[in-house]
Amino acid sequence: MNKIGKAVIPCGGLGTRFMPVTKAVPKEILPVIDTPVLAYIVDEIIASGIHEILIILGRGKEAIRDYFTPSPRLEKALAKKPELVEQLRRINGNADISFCMQTEPRGSGDAVMHAHAFTCKEPFVMSNGDDLIVSDVPAVKQLTDAYEKQPALVLGVQTVAESETDKYGIINPTHTDGKIVWCDSIIEKPKKNPPSLYAALGRYVLTPEIYDYIENLPPSSGEVSLTDAIGAMMKDGKVYAYEFEGRRYDMGDRFGALTATVDFALKRSELKEKFKDYLKSVISDG
């Protein structure tokens, strides 16, 4: 069994839920206080022991490359502020980050195909670029540990409210074994009668077979669906879901971003008390 050493982060979406700012700024680098969402996701991957990362960019996402690329000019300009220089160097100092371009927004399946040359015949982690997960044990590490015990494609899930199931891929579970949820199908954003409350939430361990399943999907002039390929693998018994622990923030959603900013501010030692007092004053005035 191959130990997982690579991760892929697709960042090709248009960010329509966060318009108009995403016309100019990729949703993946919108800040949680002073740090881009994507930087937290990269840190989660690194903390899970993975140091080779491919970020798949879409058109208009060049700012992501700029953020993760060293800037000697800026470091020179900040030479008298060594603490800031150190912050800049930490951005990409612990991982080998590379990039490729998805020239057209043809869906998550097409994005994964762009990673084929990077991952070759190895299993790899995929993390969505706008799903921020906070947990004691990194969510990626929870899934890779599960994979090492039970090699297969692993789909990271949590339960959601029934009113929210139309936002996610929802699995049909057959039985559970601790945090492992065996399943035989997945429905993308069911409008009614969801098969369960288990939702796929942006963390995966993908096996090399996924490329064949994507290539064998029925021809489509629209988006290439990763969910459809995973569903086909489920029917062949090559997938299970893992109910990971952690608080997940949908950073492509305005409310998700607001709650993350509040929660992170209340955890920052230099902001906590001042921000808490401000929130109290706002609530009392309201």
Image: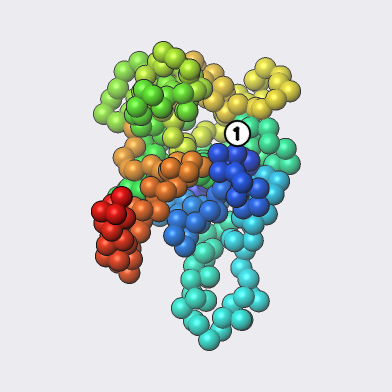
Q: Nearer the viewer, residue 9 or 253?
A: 253
Name of the residue lying farthest toward the top:
193
Name of the residue lying farthest toward the bottom:
80
Residue 98 visible in the shown view: no
Secondary structure at numbered mark 1 = helix
Q: Is residue 83 placed above or below 37 in the rendered structure?
A: below
User: Which residue does the image show at 68% across and 36% down from the upper left?
Assistant: 105
User: Which residue does the image show at 39% across and 31% down from the upper left?
Assistant: 157
Residue 136 visible in the shown view: yes
Q: Nearer the viewer, residue 135 or 249?
A: 249
Q: Nearer the viewer, residue 159 or 14?
A: 14
Percent across and percent down for residue 137 are: 32, 48
Percent across and percent down for residue 63 are: 64, 57
Residue 161 lies in quadrant: top left
* Number of dots carrying numbers: 1
User: Which residue does the image show at 66% across and 52% down from the upper left?
Assistant: 24
Q: Is residue 118 placed above or below 86 in the rendered structure?
A: above
In the rendered structure, the answer to whether residue 28 lies left or right of residue 200 reads right
Percent across and percent down for residue 36 are: 50, 56
Name of the residue lying farthest toward the front:
285
Neighbour tally class for label 1: few under 14, some 14-19, many 20 plus, Cα within 10 Å: some
In the rendered structure, the answer to whether residue 103 lies left or right of residue 217 reads right
Q: Nearer the viewer, residue 237 or 121?
A: 237
Percent across and percent down for residue 219 are: 71, 19
- What kind of residue is marked 1? Ser
In the rendered structure, the answer to whether residue 5 lies left or right of residue 70 reads left
Residue 184 lies in quadrant: top left
User: Which residue does the image show at 36% across and 53% down from the upper left?
Assistant: 262
Image quarter (top left, top right, bottom left or bottom right) of the N terminus: top left
Question: Which residue matches tag 1?
Answer: 108
